[in-house]
Amino acid sequence: MKALVTGGAGFIGSNIVKELIKQGYKVNILDNLSSGYFINIKEYVINGQADFCGGDIRDYASVLHAMEDTDIVFHLAASVGRQRSLDNPQLDSENNLIGTINVLEAMRKYRVKRIIYSSSASMFGELVTPTIDENHPQNADSPYGVSKLAAEKMILAYAELYDIISVCLRYFNIYGINQRFDMYGNVIPIFAKRIYSGEPVIIYGDGTQTRDFVNVSDVAKANLMAATSDYGTNVYNIGSGSSITINELAEMMIKISGKKREIIYAPERSADVKHCKANAEKILKTMGFRPEKELESGLIEYMNWFRSNKLY
Ligand SMILES: NC(=O)c1ccc[n+]([C@@H]2O[C@H](COP(=O)([O-])OP(=O)(O)OC[C@H]3O[C@@H](n4cnc5c(N)ncnc54)[C@H](O)[C@@H]3O)[C@@H](O)[C@H]2O)c1
């Protein structure tokens, strides 16, 4: 079985590549390394466990080339994050929507019959219920949320039109190994960087805002389960079903580090949602998927990795 992983050098993609190799898949990675890192996949490429196509999903010829002999696609390549999309909305949609159409068209040409899409809870926009199930209104309020929603709709349309099994996994907040700090980074790498470089941890607002975190190793398992599930085309939330305040997160990470760090508070950012928690019952009831890694043990593992790789 040969899998094409777009965005396979990125944070989540590289963890899926690792799991695919573990389960005996042949793996091909298409990535332009715009936000991913070759080092995430170097070992697999050098060992001949994965092939690397340096290419761009906006370039149809590159996608066609990478798609040859593929049985299943894991589609992750994207311009990721709300702020990045506000800074460059055209680039966001070129990558996330046009790039997705290129992937779908190449699948159609080569009669590839299954895609697992890394979708995002950002498609829901402003939350109207405390927990978010798959039927929550879709009010994406950033170019990123809109492009992820549009790509998901496009994938579902291709499923209907061309008989492609399409499983869309809507991630909430994912963290774990290979998640590096960058200017658009997520809260966990940002806190880790500040803690290990001796700086106070900054929280925007009063820190009572909540988030639902899932470890990337669980996300990789969900992708692999979706690859072989008999439930056909569908959309699923991937969340833990529980949430933690940002105050609790900061305290937990400081405690794990064994350092003494001050928490300082900065004015709330208007774009930040206050609470975010997934209802992830649907994937539990259908595929039996439930995230297994506890946040604390996942954070211990993450912070060890972050510190030992000197990512601060
Ligand atoms: N990290 C999260 O919490 C989260 C939450 C919801 C959804 N997602 C989705 O998961 C997927 C992976 O996100 P991630 O957090 O691993 O981010 P990432 O930036 O680490 O991974 C994206 C990868 O895609 C590659 N890429 C970007 N544009 C490309 C292009 N035009 N052609 C080829 N490759 C390209 C990047 O180089 C990178 O390796 C994305 O689709 C994202 O929308 C992530």
Image (cartoon, rainbow, N blue to C red):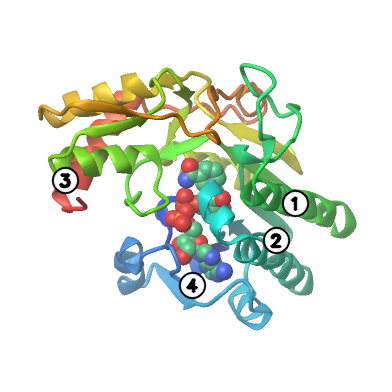
Work out whether residue 69 can be spotted: no
Residue underneath mark 3: 307
Identified by mark 2, the residue type is Leu
Task: Count residues near mark 3 (Cα–Cα under 10 Å), then give few for <14, some for 14-19, many for 20+.
Answer: some
Q: Position of residue 4 (x, y in %)?
A: 56, 65
Residue underneath mark 2: 97
Which element carries disc 4, helix, strand or loop? loop
Q: CA distance from mark 2 to mark 1?
A: 7 Å
Question: Of callouts 3 and 2, which one flags the residue occurring earlier in the amino acid sequence?
Answer: 2
Labelled pair 2, 1 in contact (Cβ < 8 Å): yes
Residue underneath mark 4: 32
Identified by mark 1, the residue type is Ala
Q: CA distance from mark 3 to mark 2?
A: 36 Å
Task: Tell me the quarter of the picture where residue 235 sits.
Answer: top right
Residue underneath mark 1: 150
Labelled pair 4, 2 in contact (Cβ < 8 Å): no
So how many labels did they put on this image?
Answer: 4
Using the image, determine if residue 116 lies above or below residue 3.
above
Task: Tell me the quarter of the picture where residue 48 sits.
Answer: bottom left
